[in-house]
Amino acid sequence: MKQKIYTIGVATVAIVFAGAIFKVNHFPGAGVMLTAGLASLILLFLPLALINHFRSAESMKNLTLYIVTYVTCFVVFTAMLFKLQHWPYGGTLLSIALPFPYLIFLPVFIAVTSKDKNFNIYNTVFVLLLLALNSVFTGLLALNVTSDRVVDSYRLSQSYNKQEMVLTTFASDTKESAINTKIDEVIRTINECQTLILKVDGKTREQWKNEPGNIDRPDFRGTAANSLDDSGEPYAERLQKGLKELIELMAVTPGYELFAKNAPLIFNFRGDDPEWSKQVFNDFYAWVLIYLDGLEASLNTIKVTGPV
């Protein structure tokens, strides 16, 4: 039994290590290896190792500690996997995983081991050091993953802004129409939203367009929504209403029906969802600005393209 557990453990560590190397170098297959490795660790190796150790101890008095140990490992490693894979609720799970060992595992560990007169105090010190290392690693994991994604997003915003500069030149020569008038109205709302949001950092839209990323606390959620709420004007609702009216207008305008049909994908928009504006503006501060850049570029593209 022990030989099988050791084999599974070595294989699991090898897969996780290889997945980590692939992830750092952005090689294909990194996500699959990390998922397989951590899933094997959580669902196969840890249960087998803990059960085997528990049986060899031939005592039921520490059963609670074994259960809490597994639950703690399950929570921590699952949160890491979700954060590494950028799956939904990864940040929430990581926020739970950070304090979990201290609030759940440590009290049980101390309560159980304090009753054992033969227990070595150095084991307790070792466990505390492991918990501290876990907190540092988990915190750095969150910072690094978020930072990498935000930096990559800045490059996307730069592309949007360059595209917008070119499209604006062509858009000035387009004919007046109900569609173009509505597009201009929605773009004005976008610009007003960005102006208010950037006031948090004392930045202007021109500064953001010239150098996306020059903002403080880019990964703070709710900053954009709070900025708009503090203005006293329903800019988020106005943007949602404007996009919905534009899509409805395109649906009945010859040549724009295809744009209207694909609007949810083009604009990443759910017109009938009352929570859409809240979800958009409660995202990371930087990603709200980047989304608005992309939305403006898409609107200018439709304006320049005209009916098809």
Image (tube, rainbow, N blue to C red):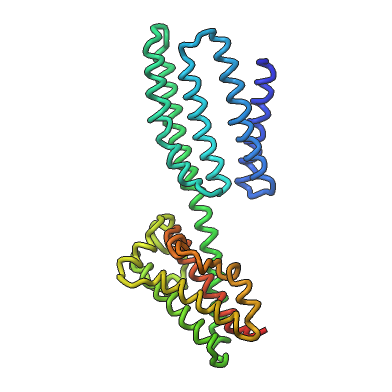
Quadrant of the rendered image containing residue 247: bottom right
Residue at 33%, 72% in the rendered image: 233
In front: 171, or 306? 306
Say which residue appears at 43% left-offset and 35% top-offset.
135
Q: Who is closer to the viewer here, 286 or 214?
A: 286
**Position of 225 compared to 167: left or right?**
left
From where the camera sits, is residue 194 visible? no
Q: Where does residue 291 sit, x and y in percent of width and height?
A: 50, 66
Which image quadrant: the C terminus? bottom right
Expressed as whole percent of the image width and height from the top left, the position of residue 27 reads 67, 48
Q: Answer whether residue 225 is visible to the viewer in this image.
A: yes
State how many labels appear: 0
Locate the N terminus by quadrant: top right
Looking at the picture, how far across and down is residue 302, in whole percent? 59, 80
**Residue for point 48% across, 45% down:** 142
Indicate whether 101 appears above or below 190: above
Q: Residue at x 56, y 48 (%)?
A: 87
The answer to which image quadrant residue 164 occupies is bottom right
Q: Where is residue 35 shown, x and y percent of the image? A: 63, 40
